Image (cartoon, rainbow, N blue to C red):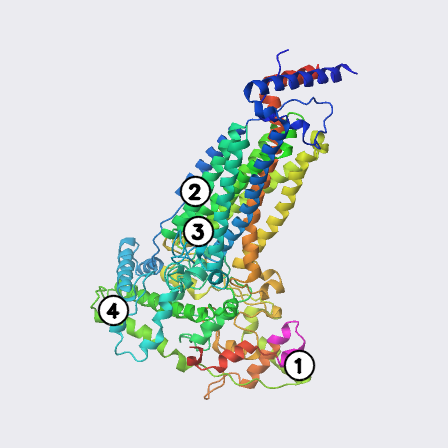
Amino acid sequence: MKPARCTSDSLYGLDSYFPKPFAMAPSVPPVILNTTPQRLLTLVAQMMVILLTCVMVGCGPAKIEYRPNALYAVSLHREQGDADHTESEESSTRAAALAERWFGTADSPVWPSELLAATPGADEVVRMDDVERSAGPVGRGNDKIERGLYRKHCVPCHGVTGDGRGLAASMLSPYPRDFRRGTFKFKSTPTGVKPTRADLVRTLHDGIPGTSMPSFAALELSKEFKNDIESLVEYVRFLSIRGEVERRLIAKHARGESQLNPDDESAIEVVRLVVANWASAATKVLPIPNPPELAPEQFNESAKRGEEWFRSELTACAKCHGPSGAGDGNSQDFDDWTKDWTLLAGIDPKKKSDWKEMKPFGALKPVIDKPRNLAWGAFHGGGNRQDLFRRLVLGIEGTPMPPIARAINGNPGLTDGEIWDLVHYVQSLSSVPSSSLASAKSTLDDTIRSKPEGAVE
Amino acid sequence: MSATQELKSNESRELKSNDSRELKSNDSRKVLPGRASAAWKQSWFWAWATTIFVFPLIWVGGLVTTHDAGMAVPDWPGTYGYNLFLYPVTAWLYGPFDLFVEHGHRLLGSLVGLLSIALCVAAWSTETRRWYRWATIGLLLAVISQGLLGGFRVVLDGRTIAMLHGCGGPMVFALATFLALSASSDWASARPVIPSRGMRWISLALLLSTIVQLILGAQLRHALPDTSPSGFMSLVHLHLTMAAVVTLIIVLVAIVGRSGTYREAREILTPANALLLLLIVQLCLGIATWIVNYAMPWADLSQWLAKYAISAKGYWESLIVTGHQATGSLMIATSVWLVCRVWRRQGQLVRNPQSFTISKRLEA
């Protein structure tokens, strides 16, 4: 018999030096093995080449830039019956070019100080040293100072431009905020007024429970990163101002009011207006009265009165939040960020074929803004009594939640005492015992609220 | 003695004597038991040392990505103007966390480089298997390439290169694992079980799918800031689909490993069980990774989820995300383990005509 060919492995004769714990098939003879590792290695190498080629093909462009607001431009032009996207592209491109001239690029942001010499408080609106530290690519220079905070912490959701179209945006609920509209939900100022620094700091510090907005409180534990939240807030303000200026410029061009030349006074006036709105926000904070100190029985009575207000026609709370506050009302409304383009473009957000037309320009699938289930006790803008009072009297801007009618300066509506009753009823819906609810306060909230605007600085 | 046992004994004797003849004619040192054993041990030692240190290297590399620390040190190959090995220890240990992680990754990478050189030296001075010697060279080149990719990622500040670097790490780990396994006693003493093409191809399919899954994961981790939401969503869906495929294959391996021929074959069952365990851990880590990064997509499901606020760059969050990536690498290495055990035991019975003859004769 011609013997089996001996492989180089078997030359060791290792079978006789090592134990054979795996020889478990007695009926099979000890055949000298002749596996083909070369073949395996070659196969693996070939697979690697193919896969890495696929990866390379999937790589996107490396240059990171602010994205023009094409969706708003297209919506505006469609509003005016112009279905040709060439003109909308011109509007968005011209506005983006002007915005870049005045506000710089994603890697090198600038502040248009020369345009704002006559605007009071314009230099205080945004701190450019913080903006420069937050913008650009992530990393440290030779000075060991970390830069690119915004790309490190915010870009995956809010996008480079702050348009709420980060890479993960379409999978999040609710969608990340689009800063360019200048509309923010949780703030201490009335509808139509910009948020204060403290409002934004609070959102970053606490996060928003139940959503993808994280708490950045962990940064404050580090000596190096403790000011990062403030730096990020400055960049968010910068992006919001830049984005709103761009939007208004698009509107001017689309309506034929300006050709968006750099020396066009009406275009420059847009910058001044937007910056002035931000500069005056801190003076318009709505003061919230101190909550009444109540014994548990008094709290229960107050909550009972609040229940009546909750179900009344005047407040219409039950219409959206449902009679039991479980968020099961009949509201089928969308938020303002969705209405912003669907109403302008005359699109039915519930029709897939309609909104899909706008997808190439940056539209995300319209999602109904669900009312909160109050029984969970999970309030996005803070759950202490003052927070709830603030939400009731200010509403949540950009959403279907309106401000409640408040009896102040002779206006008809609920008195502060009645609003506290409503607050107590809302709190009583969650499973927290009434004794602890009566004195429930968020330490952080009180700390931040007690500071004037400048104190956060 | 039955006819089968007699035949088996004769076959064994014939093969053994043939071995000795060929050994003597080829290389006299190969017949010396002590020498051969020492050679085996050297390769085994350095291959395992390399493999063991590649895993923490991958883990620390994952931390670099989690903390976006790739550019924490702006120069390369030095560190802030210092030679890599002379950077002050106090500045490294007490400096910012991202610098600590990035510089640590570089030092660990250098150590792995030195270990792969030692493996090459050991293999080329004592190993007799030609393919093994060249494979150690391949590992060294792979480690050097990884180092260069890491360096170019810093010099060019390229996130795409970072992604390639992230994909390459587990491949180096897989190759090192393969070299460690092929220098082990199990490789030498492997005995054929029963020929089964199915198990061989299942194990290879598993290896391939874990690699693809890791590459998809790396695409998600290193996605460029201006990636479109729909592109990212497609990647997520692909990653989830691939997770289902990997799960299916591992479950299949576990079922086949417990049935018929393989019921008593512990050497197949061990990696199959390890894969099953890793799969459970990995699936949990995968879900947790999504939650700590983006929260639960269905926060309306419960009060706890509705109240849960995710924490950016928190300690546990970092560990979970990095652990998910590192466990992916471990699954690739374990798949290599399974492939080695299956192919080492079954490949030759089909491919080697001589063995095939023996089997046929035994059957007769």
- Disc number for residue A300: 1
Name the secondary structure under disc 2. helix
Q: Do marks 4 and 1 both belong to one polypeptide chain?
A: yes
Residue type, numbered disc 2: Ser
Label 1 resides on the chain identified as: A
Tag 3 residue: B223
Rounded to the nearest angstrom, the CA distance separating label 3 from label 2 is: 22 Å
Q: Is residue A10 left or right of residue A347?
A: right
Please provide the residue range marked out in magenta.
Answer: A426-439
Q: Is residue A54 above or below residue B230?
A: above
Which one is in front in this view, the residue at disc 3 or the one at disc 4?
Answer: 3
Q: Position of residue A453 (x, y in %)?
A: 43, 80
Label 4 resides on the chain identified as: A
Rounded to the nearest angstrom, the CA distance separating label 3 from label 4 is: 36 Å
Q: Position of residue B187 (x, y in %)?
A: 62, 31
Q: Is residue B39 left or right of residue A112?
A: right
Q: Are there few (<14), some (14-19), or many (20+) residues within 10 Å of tag 2?
A: some
Looking at the image, tell me whether mark 4 or mark 1 is earlier in sequence order. Answer: 4
Tag 2 residue: B145
Name the secondary structure under disc 4. helix
Labels 3 and 1 touching (C-beta < 8 A): no
Rounded to the nearest angstrom, the CA distance separating label 4 from label 2 is: 53 Å
Label 3 resides on the chain identified as: B
Tag 4 residue: A267
Residue type, numbered disc 4: Ala
Q: Main secondary structure of the magenta part?
A: helix
Rounded to the nearest angstrom, the CA distance separating label 2 from label 1 is: 70 Å
